[in-house]
Amino acid sequence: MWLGSSWVIILVIVVAQSYAAVRRLLAYLRYFQQEGYEAIRFLKWAKLRSLTDPIFWVSAGASFLFLWSPAAAVGLFILGIVALALAQPDPRRSGKIPLKMTWRATRVLAVAVVVAAAVWTATIWAYPVVDVRAAFFASMVTFALIPAVLIVANVLLAPYERHVQTSYEREAAARVRDVRPFVIGITGSYGKSSAKAMLAHVLQYKGPTLAASGSVNTLMGVTRHIREELVFGHEFMVVEMGAFKKGSIRRLCELTPPSAGLITAVGDMHLERFGSTDEIVKAKSELAEAVPAGGLLVVNADSPGALRIARSAVGRRVLLYGETSPEDLETRLGHVSFSKQGTTFVLTTREGTHTCFTPLLGRPIILNLTGVFTLAAALGVDPAVIVGAMRTLKPVSNRLEVVEDRGVTWIRDAYNSNQFGFRAALEVAAALPVARRFLATPGVIELGREQFQVNRALSKEAAVVCDKTLIVADANRAAFVSGHRDAGREAALVPVPNRHEAFRWLRETVKEGDAVILENDLPDLYERTAGVFWKESAAS
């Protein structure tokens, strides 16, 4: 033994590496949470990232250094991993989507700590000689396996999570049966959240209406919303129904049986997850199938995918709306005109014509508003009341929200972008009387094999409208280079590594009278940002 008992030194090593391990688990947990605790998607992001962890290499270096200088090895290990752990940004307060320590995240972290301790203990006892060097080796193995540790913890908790979720679902379902609101389900590949907010705003003039704020559209999100917010007296409940796979909307409809449905558009959003547009149509069809015979189904006829669903909805009262569709429409949108104040447009119905204004901007949003008008009118709301309510709508934050700041027009469309919203932002920017137009975007994602070509086309269109385009991060950089080359404007493309650098460039360049489009904001999974190891973690 040296420097007294090696067990005392091992104890100090355990304390230091335990502190660092918890910090690393928190960092990885943020990304695991962003992937919805889906193991395969999380592993696709993590890959071999843990083998680039400086703490992994400090542990390995200490193990080798121990052969020549035990004291130096212990000092390197303890000081090194504590310093690296302290330097790591706190994921609960850093990044674009901070880690939310929900009860589930807390449980996963707690079990992961136990699993990590088990890995460390098993490794040290499997080592030929249980000494200080064995502790270094055990730490190296533990840090290399941290992504797997989180996955194992989540698997171990799965039975309990299912039990908890099932009990919550039962409670929420009972609340819906007791209150008996008229439930309107809304789905689509995009436009769900804005349509939900607009419909709830209009329906409140007919009766007390409940709708979750933001993008609450998963089974557990809606379950929690019902348990906390649905009370006796609510006449209407508008439910946004999202899906990453077939069966998701069916389960939401079992929880909240819809009396009516609104399908905004069905396209290539999340194509990477579904695999094909046909699978997306099948998933979104679950809302139409859940609407009872004779029930109301309002569908965007401009969307081929949504129109397929409408044509298969036998026995339902189907009303179509749109702008360009040749179908016989209940409501047709026309004469759309944008300004900094909002949008002027005309809605033509079977009964007459309505000239409308709303502070909202963007052709997809106005088309969604056409669907809202159609559904609300079918439920008995006076069309004049609906037109009046449109004037008091407020833009949803970061969904084609136009803000003036010190002479600069900011078109904020950073949330959950798709190619149609992207084009809508370009259209609005082109219509505004400004000196120069700038675009900052990482492009659109989760389009599978179509991602390159879609982003290439968007890049070419942006090159026509904007004086400069900042392509953020690496996810779609090659596609944007190709698109600007197609437009003959390669010099107008400015690559930047992350959102922080994009804003720095804009602050130095933009002047009074200019307009800036902020289109899409990728989660931390896709961008070099405050990450796992240090402030500029390597992009995946």
Image: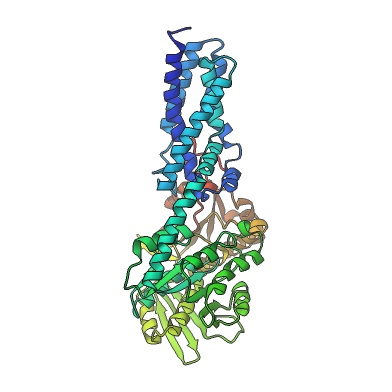
Among the 4 quarters of the image, the one containing residue 344: bottom left
Residue 502, visible in the rendered structure: no
Q: x and y percent of residue 257 in the render?
A: 48, 71
Can you say whether 159 is above or below 393 in the image? above
Among the 4 quarters of the image, the one containing residue 9: top left
Q: Give 87 or 339, whichever is nearer the viewer.
A: 87
Among the 4 quarters of the image, the one containing residue 324: bottom right
Q: x and y percent of residue 155 in the render?
A: 54, 43
Determine whether, in the image, residue 453 is placed left or right of residue 400: right
Can you say whether 298 is above or below 122 in the image? below
The colour scheme applied to this rendered structure is rainbow
Residue 202, visible in the rendered structure: yes
Determine whether, in the image, residue 384 is placed left or right of residue 480: left
Question: In the orientation shown, which residue stands out farthest toward the bottom?
Answer: 351
Position of the C terminus, as image quadrant, is: top right
Label count reads 0
Q: x and y percent of residue 514 in the render?
A: 44, 62
Determine whether, in the image, residue 268 is placed left or right of residue 362: right
Q: x and y percent of residue 88 in the render?
A: 44, 35
Determine whether, in the image, residue 113 is placed left or right of residue 405: right
Write the residue at 44% across / 8% down.
3
Can you say whether 50 is above or below 79 in the image? below
Q: Give 400 or 410, whichever is nearer the viewer.
A: 400
Write the residue at 48% across / 13% down.
72
Q: Give 396 or 428, whichever is nearer the viewer.
A: 396
Write the residue at 54% across / 24% down.
138
